[in-house]
Structures are given as C-alpha cells and as structure tokens.
Image (cartoon, helix red, strand yellow):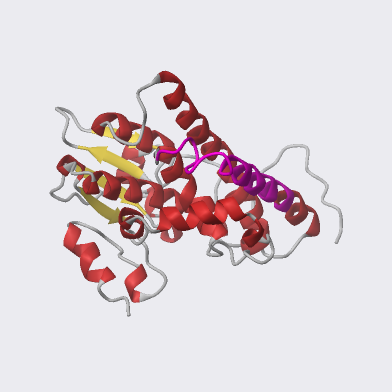
Amino acid sequence: MSEYLPPKVWTFDSENGGAWASLNRPTAGATHEAVLPEGKQPLQLYSMGTPNGQKVTIMLEELLAAGETGAEYDAHLIRISEGDQFSSGFVGVNPNSKIPALLDRSAEQPIRIFESGAILLYLAEKFEHFLPTELSERTEVLNWLFWLQGSAPYLGGGFGHFYAYAPEKMEYPINRFTMEAKRQLDLLDQQLATSQFIASDHYSIADIAIWPWYGNLARGLQYDAGDFLDVKSYKNLQRWAEEVWQRPAVQRGNIVNKTWGEPWQMLPERHHASDIDNVLKLKP
C-alpha cells in the first residue's frame, strides 16, 4: 500500500468509499426540503434503531413502565442511509443532522432536544426518574453519562468503522481502535465489580446510555466482533448486560425504529404501546 501524502489544503473531490460514503460531506445544513411527520403523542421522536436511537426509546419505555403517561411518544423512522437526516424538517429539530432528535410538544412552545445524552438528561429531569437528586450520586451518574458520549465514538466511528465498514481492512487503525475498545470494556468490567449497575446499585440513565453500545457488544451483537474482542472474558460486564436486557422496557425500546433482524425484533415506527406488543408476540 502506497503512503498517503496529504495535500497542502484538503478539498472534497471524491467519495472515500465504504458504508455511508455517498452521504458524507464536509458541510452542514439541509440538502432538500421535506416536512417532518407528526403524530398525536406529546413527544415526537425522529430516529433509527441504532445504539444512539435505542438509548432514547429505552428511556421512554422505562418512563412509561414507571407510570409516566406524559412520556407517550410517536417514533418516526429517519432512514439515515437515504439521507432523511438532511431534510429541512429534520435540520430544524437537529441542526447537526444526527439521530435521535426529539420534539416536546407538551410545553407552551415546542422544545427541541438533540444529541442522545441531552435527550436522556432532559427526560430524566422532566419526569424525575433515573437520575438521583443527591449531589454526589447525581454527579456520578452524569460522570458515566458523559463518559459514554465521549467514548462511544471510539467504539463506533473508530473500531466499528475500520473493523466492519471500511472498504478495506487496515492493520494500523484496527489495532489502534481495538486496543481502545478493549480498554473501555475493561474499565466497565472493573466498575461493575464494585456495583450492580454502572454508577451505583441503582439503575439510571448511565445504564440506559451505555447499554445499547456496550451491552449489545458484550452480547456479541455489535459488528460481529464478539470473538475478536473476547467479550465473554469480561464477566462483570456480561452479568450487567444480561441483567439490563431482562428489563421489559429495554426489550421494548430495543426494537423501535429498527428495520433489520427477525420479524419480532423490528418495528419501523411506534405510535402506540400496542405497536410494540404486536411485534413482540411474533417471537416463537
């Protein structure tokens, strides 16, 4: 392989190959006009069932399970492979053109919330669930919430991209990001040796944020990399991943806005609780 010599000034003159290459561009903003759909529920979610999307649907299902009827939501599918996130309607809710994005219409004026960590924090404060009020406990939960927001890009955009999606396998980036991914797994494993859940012995938005990325990875469902990363060796992480998975709200939120998998694992759009019920009934 010949060495790449960067030009003095980079210009965008060709696609870089690999998954999503045709959508990548160096500018922000809308590429086309399109109005977002709206349902009848107080909360309007625009998302896809990726790990970042699952964070929010799991949170919403947990809130509903806790009796918060104000957390009823419509989940509209944003097909990121087709560029829905670059529509004028979506950019109006999230100028960063990334899923998920949430519109809260229960306020006097609709409130937009974008970035998954911000959405979890907003919902936790709005409904007063899954975030302690005592200062030290709250801070520990937020420590891990922001850890996830900073660490997951190394797992997804780093390891996941070069291991699973890049147009060719390259030893240097795969080794570099594998080392970081395993360091993160080891960190979580050590943390979970001292507490039942991530931040304490109480389930919180830290678990809701981290599980879709690292719980799915521990269960061998991310990037087909379970054996490569030896995920079964992280025993405390394995215990936590399975314990969180057994929560009904996690299993419900896990399928929303998902368009791949078995029939009982995917629900492109959710507008009522029965939508999820009907899909889960398909499981043999």
| Foreground of the two, 147 or 191 | 191
Quadrant holding the N terminus:
bottom right
State which quadrant residue 280 falls in: bottom left
Tell whether position 198 is magenta: yes
Magenta stretch contains residue 213: no
Determine the residue positioned at 49% across, 45% down: 210
Q: Which residues are magenta?
A: 178-202
Residue at 28 percent across and 50 percent down: it is: 61
Whether residue 145 can be seen here? yes
Work out which residue is located at the far right of the displayed protein and give it: 2
Say which of 28 and 233 sits in front.
233
* The C terminus lies in quadrant: bottom left
Q: Nearer the viewer, residue 166 or 5?
A: 166
Residue 14 seen anywhere in this rendered image of the structure: no
Residue 186 at x, y = what percent? 66, 46
Q: Position of residue 31 (x, y in %)?
A: 41, 48
| Image-quadrant location for residue 77 | bottom left
Task: Classify 142 as above or below 235.
Answer: above
